[in-house]
Image (cartoon, rainbow, N blue to C red):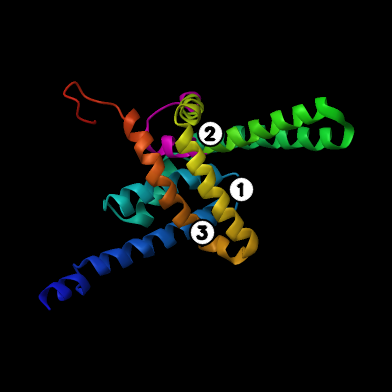
């Protein structure tokens, strides 16, 4: 009985788990709210990942406070990255649309496939870029470079991230109302893969301890 009281008490694992679930859902809602202007999706995504890892996974700080702290701190660089990736993706889709209407044959199909692959690669870059921005003190250019590198270097992780996005995307397609519940759990699950990569690139001191 004593063990059960510890589990369900205020300091027990059950209450702690409920707190984490609550934080995950609140952070997901904050992401939706702060992404409504569209231009701020990058900053919102950076803040979501930062608060998810720091507060939910590492039990450090308050989720809402850390979310807005990261949002304000990374607003400008995250917005620049978001605009670059979104504009490039839009250009790829416009090219695909034009080719599908104006061309036929294998040449047109080849370039459609090329633009489609580039679009997927840009999505992979975004999966790494905003978490990297939340973790590293780098310029926009270096964030984009390291995202390009990670997307290729850790191919299996990249495929896992795309699988997570695709699965949840199907759920939202089937049940649109899930879009209000999905962002938090998606990022929590993706962080399981991303943290293994990001930790490999954290700066080290001479003694081998992370700064």
> In the drawing, what numbered circle is on residue 125?
2
Tell me where the magenta segment starts and ends, as one range. 127-142
Secondary structure, magenta segment, majority class: helix
Q: Which residue: 64% across, 63% down?
A: 174
Q: Considering the numbered disc 2 on the image, is that residue within a helix, a strand or a loop?
A: helix
**Residue drawn where x is 53% and y is 46% of the image:** 163
204 to 79, vertically: above or below:
above
Q: Position of residue 193 (x, y in %)?
A: 40, 42
| Residue at mark 2 to residue at mark 3: CA–CA distance | 21 Å
CA neighbours of label 3 inside 10 A, class few (<14), some (14 to 19), many (20+) = some
Point out the tag, 3 or 1, that comes first from the N-terminus.
Answer: 1
- Residue at the limit of the structure toward the top, as seen here: 206
Question: Residue 87: percent from the left, percent from the top?
Answer: 66, 34
Q: Which mark is residue 107?
A: none
Residue 140 part of the magenta-drawn span: yes
Q: Which residue is mark 1?
A: 38
């Amino acid at each position: 009985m004593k063990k059960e009281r510890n589990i369900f008490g205020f300091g027990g694992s059950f209450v702690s788990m409920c707190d984490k679930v609550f934080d995950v859902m609140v952070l997901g809602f904050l992401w939706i709210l702060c992404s409504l202007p569209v231009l701020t999706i990058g900053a919102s995504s950076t803040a979501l990942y930062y608060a998810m890892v720091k507060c939910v996974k590492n039990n450090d700080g308050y989720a809402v406070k850390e979310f807005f702290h990261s949002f304000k701190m990374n607003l400008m660089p995250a917005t620049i990255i978001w605009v670059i990736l979104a504009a490039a993706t839009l250009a790829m889709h416009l090219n695909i649309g034009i080719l599908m209407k104006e061309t036929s044959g294998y040449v047109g199909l080849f370039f459609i496939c090329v633009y489609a692959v580039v679009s997927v690669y840009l999505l992979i870059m975004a999966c790494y870029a905003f978490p990297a921005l939340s973790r590293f003190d780098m310029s926009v250019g270096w964030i984009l470079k390291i995202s390009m590198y990670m997307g290729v270097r850790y191919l299996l992780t990249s495929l896992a991230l795309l699988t997570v996005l695709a699965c949840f995307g199907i759920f939202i397609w089937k049940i649109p109302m899930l879009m209000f519940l999905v962002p938090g759990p998606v990022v929590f699950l993706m962080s399981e893969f991303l943290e293994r990569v990001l930790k490999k690139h954290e700066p080290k001191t001479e003694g081998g301890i992370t700064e």
